[in-house]
Amino acid sequence: MLQAAPSPAESMAVPDAALLLVAEDIAKSYGGVQALKGVSLAVRPGEVHGLVGANGAGKSTLIRILAGLTQPDRGRIAVDGELVAISAPQRAADLGMTFIHQELAFVPGMTVLQNIMLGLPKRRRFGMVDWRAIAREVEPVARRVGLAAPLFSGVKGLSVAEKWLINICRALVRKARLIVMDEPTASLSATEAETLLRIVEDLSRSGVAVLYVSHRLDEILRLCQRVTAFRDGRSVATLQGADLTRSSLVEAIVGGAVEHLEKPVGNAQSDEVVLAVSGLTRSPRVRDVSLALHRGEVLGIGGLVGAGRTELVRLVYGADRPDAGTMRLEGRPFAPRRPTDAVKAGFGLVPEERRSEGLVLTKSVAFNLHLSSLSRIVSGNLLPLVSAGRQRTLSNEMIRDLAIRTPDRHVPVGRLSGGNQQKVVIGRWLLRRPKILILDEPTRGVDIGARGEIHRLIRDLARQGMAVLVVSSEPDELPDLCDRVLVMAEGRIVRELTGSALTRNAIIEASYAEGRNAGDPRP
């Protein structure tokens, strides 16, 4: 009989037929890099089973395999004790599994009811879809989860919480036996999150199993009967009962006991403050944030998904307006109304989503490099024209200086690797020579070689006097790269780490700070 692979904290005594889902010794590689090195997971009917781990531990890869979006290199999956091959998403649905990802599935132009019924067979009458009859069947499910939006209204303008309820409705209409939820409360307010948690508890009582993926340990401890921890592509523990505590979860995620170190004096390269932020707030994602960025410093912003890091960057960059708080740039008041104000003031931003927000993929490398510095390649006052010679010289110099691997500057940037695309976005701002460069997830989706090159580039820019703000979900990335790291949780800065206190484990431990301690910057 198939059994879940044992872990250091688990000895399964439940027979296989009583297990809804078993994944055993699952491994998966992408481009020669092992995302999963052997993970195992067993879910019982009606339980809320937590899945935790640091960013890059392998949680999302396993979910993609269970959803039929990718195939494992090895391992076995069983449902109700029977070995299965999940070759496509429809196969996962046929087995009773529904997946609600962070990027919620929606068609904006459809009604609430049409979105609930996406991908589901529909009752027909006289050859036409009978939406009235379908609505009568769906209405009790909508009431059960507390969905207040009228079924025949559009989804445009609905909150993230309402969209989550629509996805849960879809799962229940599909009669799912297992619902996988990936970071369900990351984008919700406290009130909305509480509503969702109560729904999860109700689902469990009614016999629906939930695989709950979250960085928020308070939620994990409240909801889950058992929790499996992933670390570095392996399942390292399954905790339950008296063993399921905050400290045991953090130790499983980190890989050892967490040391509480004294915070040493900061080591910024200059005492000159370039950017000072005081009490910056935009409810509910950024709450009373204060920080100082020094010239020649690499300042990191760490924390988990939904901690408010990107939202903070958007406020600093003028993409959003704060509800409260002030900023000063080189000692003068700074209140950008739009990103162009920040750019004119000397800011550059490398966004988290470089392909959709940072590049014009069909245009050439040279075109993308000069998007933010057209004035450097335009000549003539009365009839300004792009100087082909100046563009060629500057783009070739940047390609050489950043070691951008491209056949030539005319190649569409969409054909380059992720690392080289990132260098193009960075190079665009270097041509403009900003005072402050903000990088949101600078090495996401790049290979290890390009990662090292980007890190060296960032340090070189700081040595030249540029102030650099780095936002990263990778706790391994920040200690070697940054002079200081500010860790955010629940929209607040909860810890400042420098010197010997600036370690991977300390960043992870601070990221899981309890909500009642948010706002206290002390270790």
Image (cartoon, rainbow, N blue to C red):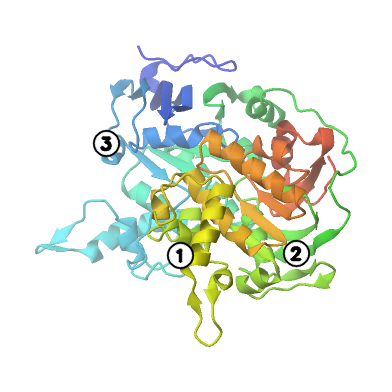
Q: Which residue: 65% across, 53% down?
A: 309
Which of discs 2 and 1 lies nearer the camera? The answer is 2
Pick whichever, 241 or 89, lies toward us.
89
In the picture shown, does residue 441 fall above or below 503? below
The answer to whether the residue labelled 2 contacts the one labelled 3, judged by CB atoms less than 8 Å apart, is no
* Residue type beneath disc 3: Arg
Q: Is residue 276 left or right of residue 214?
A: right
The residues bearing labels 2 and 3 have C-alpha atoms spaced at a distance of 48 Å
**Which SS class for mark 2?**
strand
Q: Residue furthest front?
A: 389
* Residue type beneath disc 2: Leu
Q: Residue furthest left?
A: 126
**Which SS class for mark 1?**
loop
The residues bearing labels 3 and 1 have C-alpha atoms spaced at a distance of 31 Å
Q: Which residue: 72% across, 64% down?
A: 281
The residues bearing labels 2 and 1 have C-alpha atoms spaced at a distance of 33 Å
Q: Local crowd at mark 3 within 10 Å, few (<14), some, or many (≥20)? A: some
The answer to whether the residue labelled 2 contacts the one labelled 1, judged by CB atoms less than 8 Å apart, is no
Q: Which residue is under mark 1?
A: 148
Q: Earlier in the sequence, mark 2 or mark 1?
A: 1
Q: Position of residue 302 (x, y in %)?
A: 69, 45
Pick whichever, 63 or 17, lies toward us.
63
Q: Which residue is under mark 3?
A: 91
Q: Earlier in the sequence, mark 3 or mark 1?
A: 3
Q: Position of residue 57 (x, y in %)?
A: 55, 31
Pick whichever, 485 or 20, lies toward us.
485
Q: Earlier in the sequence, mark 2 or mark 3?
A: 3
In the picture shown, does residue 234 fall above or below 182? above
Q: Position of residue 105 (x, y in %)?
A: 38, 54
The number of numbered badges drawn on the structure is 3
Q: Position of residue 126 (x, y in %)?
A: 9, 64
Q: Which residue is under mark 2?
A: 280
